[in-house]
Amino acid sequence: MFVNDFSHVALSFWGLEMRWYGILFAVGLLLNFLLLQAIFKNEKYPLKHLDSVAVWLFFGLLFGARLGHVFFYEASYYLSHPVEILKVWNGGLASHGAIIGLVIAYFSWCKVHKVKFLHYVDVLTLGMPLTGAFVRFGNFFNSELVGKPYDGPFAVVFKRLGEDFGRHPVQLYEADMNLLIFGVMLFLYWKFYRKAPRGFFFFLTLGLYFIGRFIAEFFKDHPVLWENLPITMGQFLSLLMLVVPVVYFIFVMPRQDKRGSK
C-alpha cells in the first residue's frame, strides 16, 4: 500500500511557493503547445494561427474550468460569496467546464478570424488528453479528488488528509485514461488524418473521454445526485455531453467530406 505524503509545494523561496499542481499544469500545456507546433508544421498550417488561437484557448480553459466548478458543483456557496469565484488559487476547476470553455473560445476565434470550425479543431484536440493527464497528476500531489476507500494492491493512503486507510488512486486512473486516449489519437493521426472525415478526431476524443470519465466516477468518493438515480454530477455531465459525439457519428459523419477532398 503506497503512502502519499507529498507536499503540495514543490519549491519555496523568498516567501513564494511553487506548487506541484501549477507546475504540472504548465508542463502539460507546454507539451501540448510543442506538439501542436510540430503538427502545424507537418500539415503546413500557418503558425501565426496557432499562436493566436492558443491564447484564446488558454483563457477559455481557465474561465471554463473555474465557472464549471462554480456552477456545476458549488453554485449555492459561490452565489452567496461571489468574491470567492475570483480566488482560483484556493482550488476549484472542473474538466467539463474546461471543455465547454475551450469549445466556446475556439468557436469565437473562428468567427473573429473567419475560419471554419472544423478546419483546425481535429489537430487542436490531439494534445488535450496529454494536458488532462498532467492535471490529474497534479490532483494526486494535492491529495484531492480522492477515490473511495479500498484495500487492494493499488491502494494509496493520503496522509495529508489525516487518514491511515487506503483509497482508490482515482487521479492516477484518470491520468492513465488520458494518456491512453492521447496515444490512440496520436496513432490514428499518423495513420488516418488525411483520410478522416472532418471532425472525426475531435468528436472521437470527446466520446472516449466522456466514457472514461463516466467509468472513473464509480471509483470517486463523491455523493450521488439522486437516490433513485445513483450517479454523480460528473457522470450526469458526461452523459449529457456524450450526446454530442454520438449525434456526430450517427448523423453527421456519414455525410461529412473527407479532409483530402476538394
Image (spheres, grey):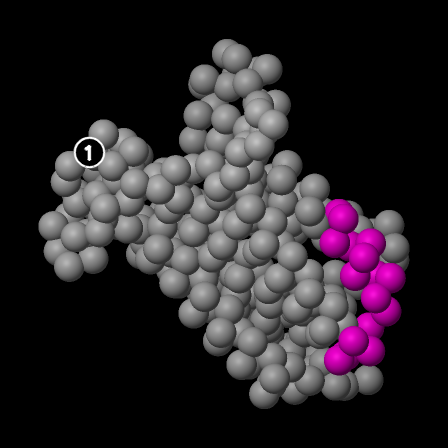
Residue 243: give x, y in percent of width and height: 48, 56
Quarter location, residue 146: top left
Residue lying farthest to the top in this orientation: 80
Relative to 98, say whether 259 is above or below. below
Residue 75 % position (x, y) = 47, 23
| Region in magenta | 41-56
In the image, 180 versus 117, the foreground residue is 180
Answer with left or right where residue 31 lies relative to residue 105. Answer: left
Where is 64 relative to 48, above or below? above
Residue at 60%, 79% in the rendered image? 189
Q: Please report the residue visible at 57 percent of the width from the left and 32 percent of the height from the top.
A: 13
224 sits left or right of 213 in the view: left
Q: Is residue 161 visible?
A: yes
Q: Is residue 97 visible?
A: no
Residue 212 in percent (x, y) is at 38, 60
Label 1 environment density (alpha carbons within 10 Å; few <14, some 14–19, many ≥20): few
Tell which residue pokes out farthest to the left in this image.
Answer: 151
Secondary structure mainly formed by the magenta segment? helix
Looking at the picture, tell me which residue is in the foreground, 51 or 157: 157
Residue furthest to the front? 14
Q: Residue at x 55, y 37 (%)?
A: 18
Q: Position of residue 129 (x, y in %)?
A: 52, 61
Q: Which residue is mark 1?
A: 163
Q: Residue at x 65, y 86 (%)?
A: 195
Residue closer to the observer: 187 or 137: 137
Quadrant occupied by the C terminus: bottom right
Q: Give the quadrant of residue 162.
A: top left
The verdict on residue 49 being magenta is: yes
Q: Amino acid at mark 1?
A: Glu
208 shown above or below 235: below
As helix, strand or loop, the secondary structure at mark 1 comes to loop
Residue 121 on the magenta span: no
